[in-house]
Image: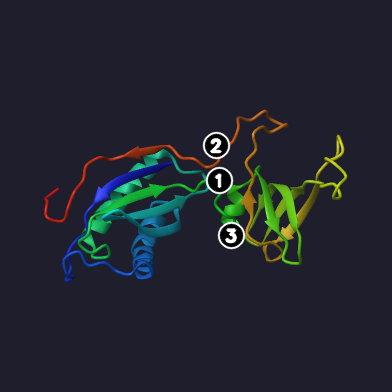
Amino acid sequence: MSVRSDGDGAQRGRAEGGRLPREQAVAELTRLLEPEVARAGFDLEEVDVRPAGRRRLVKIVVDADGGVSLDDVSDLSQAVSEMLDASDVMGTAPYVLEVTSPGVDRPLTEPRHWRRAAGRLVVAPLTEGGQIEGRVVEADDTSVVLDVVARPAKGKGGPKAGSKPVRRTFAYAELGRGRVQVEFRRADDGAAPDDGGSADTAGADETRSPAEPE
């Protein structure tokens, strides 16, 4: 889920419309926002800045063990917007702020990502070659437990009926970037189809420019 709002860059000793290079803007935004996001009880997963016509899109991705609600995102969006308007990171050029939670296609690169994927089917490359597919049972700071899905040999058709997954523990050093797999139906619980990571979006239509008061 995500919330968008329009903002204006604050002038702090810059030329009119001055912009930082993208990499520098991302680094400064991360340094500015990470403590505030942590105080609010979330992890700052990603910061990105992209051109969006005459403005820029500032994308902030946050997550938490208990998930992120639309109210959480809305409150955090307001706090982040106020911080950006009070800083000089975005210069004077207008921008669009989007605060969102990760989609299902977010790569699993940190222990907390694997922990939050508990119950989901994932695929990950093995550092020694090949790949593994399994359902996340549990994860801690050093390893993840997967119910590994048995795959048939090439050209042998589908998995045998009634074949059971094998429970295995993998150190994170044995795995590359994991990916959650979209499942249209879980045979064990009849769950509704995954939405592929699409998010509900609430937008703010108000547009502000540096010359206009709020």
- Counting residues from the N terminus, which is met first, the one under dot 2 or under dot 3? 3
Q: Which residue is mark 2?
A: 195
Badge 2 element: loop
Residue 109 position in % (x across, y down): 59, 59
Q: Nearer the viewer, residue 11 or 87?
A: 11
Q: Quadrant of residue 121?
A: top right
> In the image, is 83 to the left or to the right of 105?
left
Q: CA distance from mark 2 to mark 3?
A: 22 Å
Say whether marks 1 and 2 touch (CB < 8 Å): yes
Residue 23 position in % (x across, y down): 39, 69
Q: Amino acid at mark 2?
A: Asp
Q: Which residue is mark 3?
A: 109
Residue 78 position in % (x across, y down): 29, 47
> In the image, is 136 to the left or to the right of 206?
right
Residue drawn at the location 64% of the way across and 56% of the way down: 140
Badge 3 element: loop
Which label sits on residue 104? 1
